[in-house]
Image (tube, grey):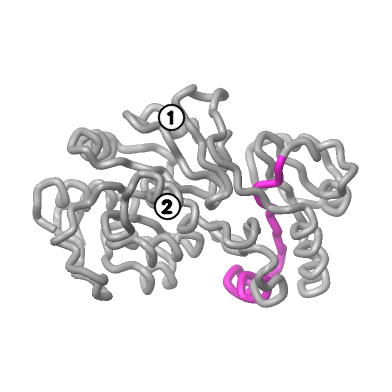
Amino acid sequence: MRDNERVTSAIREPESPAAATPPRLIATDLDGTLLRDDKSVSPRTVAALAAAEEAGIEVFFVTGRPARWMDVVSDHVHGHGLAICGNGAAVVDLHGGPGAHRFVTVRELPRNNALDAVGVLRDAAPGTVYAVEQTYGFYQEPTYPKLHMEVPDDLAPAEELLAADSPATAEPVLKILAYHPDMEPDAFLTLARLAIGDGATVTRSSPSALLEISGPGVSKASTLALCCAERGISHEEVVAFGDMPNDVEMLTWAGRSYAMGNAHPDVLAAASGRTVANNDDGVAVVIEQLLNGRM
């Protein structure tokens, strides 16, 4: 599909005809969705986001990224300036600019739940190594690989990092990261969800066997639903975009949702429509059509 063609027709029927419900909020993932593979926001996408805001449609960035990695879109927040980070673990005000982000809402992972998840996953998948994301800090085990372009605040076993007497207890835990060097990513996700159960929310957004573990019930969808409820926006008035398993719940919840052309098979199955790949400005394609009344 070329980037100037219409997106495909819906895969599933929404609860009410999509065309009869004008969008009031656009919720878009970043990596693999809004951002191109070089992590840039294309001029076409910048223009589409600005046009949506000018038309009175709010835009929410909804990402697995921590707040400190939001500089990539800080110049494109327009009027609202809010983002959902950490797969729903935090709502962040980006208005302060790089290094000055303010946490509006934090939905933390209780340390006891995190410790339980680490313990059961160590037993279920020997060789798993961990990192801990907090509101401002990042901590990891000594054997955790260099998956992130940053220096950890401390190196220690996860059990020590999450202990009640840890030096980092002043900050809430947003999520823990679990990496396995040998397992297939989707197999690792399935195993972890079965092992951890409802003690935490387990998902993934990386092409490697890297899992993201958040508090019970915390997801992009649940936090987006809370933000929409505060604004009097129904799920039918939301248009969502995503590409990886951590987007599935959000795409299922939104009245209209679009899987990117480069999306994971689970995302293609969950979304009500499809657009072209992130490198072809798939989000902008849909926004332009929405604003032109062609959808």
Residue at left offset 17%, top offset 68%: 17
From the viewer's perspective, tell me whether residue 288 is left or right of residue 209.
Answer: left
Q: Amino acid at mark 1?
A: Ser
Q: In terms of sequence position, does the residue under pointer 2 or pointer 1 come before the other?
A: 2
Mark 2 or mark 1, whichever is nearer to me? 1
Residue at left offset 64%, top offset 43%: 148
User: Which residue is identified by label 1?
Assistant: 74
Mark 1, other Cα within 10 Å: few <14 / some 14–19 / many ≥20: some
Taking the magenta stretch, the answer to whether it contains residue 22 is no
Residue 73 in picture, x, y percent from top left: 42, 34
Q: In the structure shown, which secondary structural element does the residue marked by tag 2 occupy?
A: helix
Please state, as top left, top right, bottom left or bottom right, where the C terminus lies in the image.
bottom left
Q: In the structure shown, which secondary structural element does the residue marked by tag 1 occupy?
A: helix
Residue at left offset 81%, top offset 52%: 143
Can residue 257 be seen here? The reply is no
Can residue 186 be seen here? The reply is yes
Is 30 located above or below residue 212 in the figure?
above
User: Which residue is identified by label 2?
Assistant: 32
From the viewer's perspective, tell me whether residue 262 is left or right of residue 276.
Answer: right
Mark 2, other Cα within 10 Å: few <14 / some 14–19 / many ≥20: many
Most foreground residue, 130 or 78: 78
Most foreground residue, 38 or 242: 242
* Range of residues picked out in magenta: 172-192
